[in-house]
Image (spheres, rainbow, N blue to C red):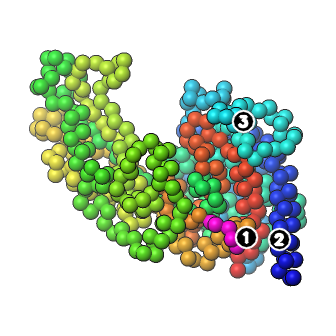
Amino acid sequence: MKRVFFLIFLVYSTVLFSQNVDHKLKPAIEEIKDFIAIPNDALVYDDILKNIKWLEEKFTDRGFIIKVLETEDKPLFFAELPRKENAKTILFYMHFDGQSVDLSKWDQEDPYKAVLKTKDGNTWKNLDWSELDKNIDESWRIFGRSTSDDKGPIVLFLNAIDLLKENHKNIPLNVKVILDGEEEKSSKPLPSAVKKYRDILAADFLIINDGPLHVSDKPTLVFGCRGITTINLTTYGPIKPQHSGHYGNYAPNPGFRLAKLLSTFKDDNGKVLINGYYDGISLNEQTQTILRSVPDDETIILKGLAVKTAEKVGDYYQQALQYPSLNIRGLSSGWTGKKARTIVPATATAAIDLRLVPESDGNRLKELIKEHIKRQGFFITNTAPTLEERMQHNKIITFESGSVTDPFRTDMDIPFAKWLEKTIKDDENDTIVKIRIMGGTVPIASFINELNIPAVIVPMVNPDNNQHSPNENLKIKNIKYGIETFYKILSSPIN
């Protein structure tokens, strides 16, 4: 009988809490709309300052003590609730900058003027904002730059704070928030800034609210992310483009030279052939069990990519993410399309990115690639070759190296991870998708290394949100989920 009463109480309290969140949907949506209206291109300094001004006002209104932390480039925004003695401290990381926009690709006049839409068959139909005064449909979406990546979660956090106050609910934690204004351009100043502001940022745990839920739309915890570094490779032909009739068969073509080199990087199954590239990585039985527990449907993934067969770096999707990647992200030489010219190009360039895992080191992998290129007979420079170098060497390549953003991975069995999993569950039977390491990059390793704290990513937004792309969006169902999740985390003591 006691169990029956407990279950009735649990259902009643869940319904009551859900209704409580429902009345926060409209103010949260209006606040997201307001925040989106401030352009936030990571490359535009004034954009970032305007966003910081908005954040100062909103966090101050919620009782936070705020600081703007200067860095070697754009400042960071920091906020903290008044401290409690003998309470654990959680540092929340999010970012408020966004990718640049191409207005011609968006299905709305201005990506910074949020639009409310509903699905009508296979198309999206605009809704008037006055519809929010009626029953709000959780399938509706807000379209606009950074709705999901990553302004939306910031607003959901603020509205969870509001709801806790309305319910006279105590926050049994010390709460700190650090908001990045350069995440979309690799957060280069972050490592030195974390070192400089170590005492201000000190915490017991780090929670990152970025990225989407698993494609199954189930509550998701991500325990790591891959790092990234970049390389640009440029090969050379004649010193300027030459007529292909006069000099074809005579002047070396840089496109062919580059293509031949790139073909030595991988085998036909997509595995990197460069000696030592995968050194240090082994996946034991326990790890394989964790990876296979993620409810991926390989058939759906391949269909979405419109490819018949995946590469064979791993036996399945999650396994593939455990290895460093080597990706050609762009190729250029001469002209194509309607501008194509009958010339032997002067140069050919490949832009390459390497996604990193904790067992790999970005600088080491780049050195392995450089040594591999030398073995293919190339003379390597780090700038355009001089005339003297061009006359001395047959095969010349410029190797330009980008900065390294380190990966991280947190042990799933630590007490904090177990607490977090239990906290975000609605009941004991809930399935939480636990991802060992995700494919993308969040510049968090500096916090983990400098502050010596574990980190877990708690995604909030819908998997099909089009982040970084035109028509980025945030589903209202996920607004509700995000407020609920922040509410649970902020109201749960850590013993």
Left or right position of 374 against 451: left
Q: Nearer the viewer, residue 374 or 429?
A: 429
Rendered location of residue 353, percent (x, y): 38, 48
Question: Which quarter shows the C terminus?
Answer: bottom right
Q: Which mark is residue 117?
A: 3
Question: Which quarter shows the N terminus?
Answer: bottom right
Q: Is residue 133 magenta?
A: no
Q: Which residue is mark 1?
A: 427
**Residue appearing at x 63%, y 29% in the figure:** 107
Q: Quadrant of residue 110?
A: top right
Rendered location of residue 306, percent (x, y): 44, 42
Which span of residues is magenta-colored? 428-432
Judge whether residue 344 can be spotted in this image.
Answer: yes
Q: Nearer the viewer, mark 2 or mark 3?
A: 2
**Contact flag, marks 2 and 1 (Cβ < 8 Å):** yes
For badge 1, the amino acid type reads Asp
**Residue appearing at x 60%, y 55% in the figure:** 216
Q: Which residue is mark 2?
A: 10
**Residue appearing at x 42%, y 59% in the figure:** 316
Q: Nearer the viewer, residue 192 or 265?
A: 265
Q: Rounded to the nearest whole Å, what is the CA distance between mark 3 and mark 1? A: 32 Å
Q: Nearer the viewer, residue 26 or 402?
A: 26
For badge 3, the amino acid type reads Lys
> How many C-alpha atoms fall within 10 Å of the one at disc 3: few (<14), some, or many (≥20)?
many
Secondary element at image label 1: loop
Rendered location of residue 182, percent (x, y): 56, 47
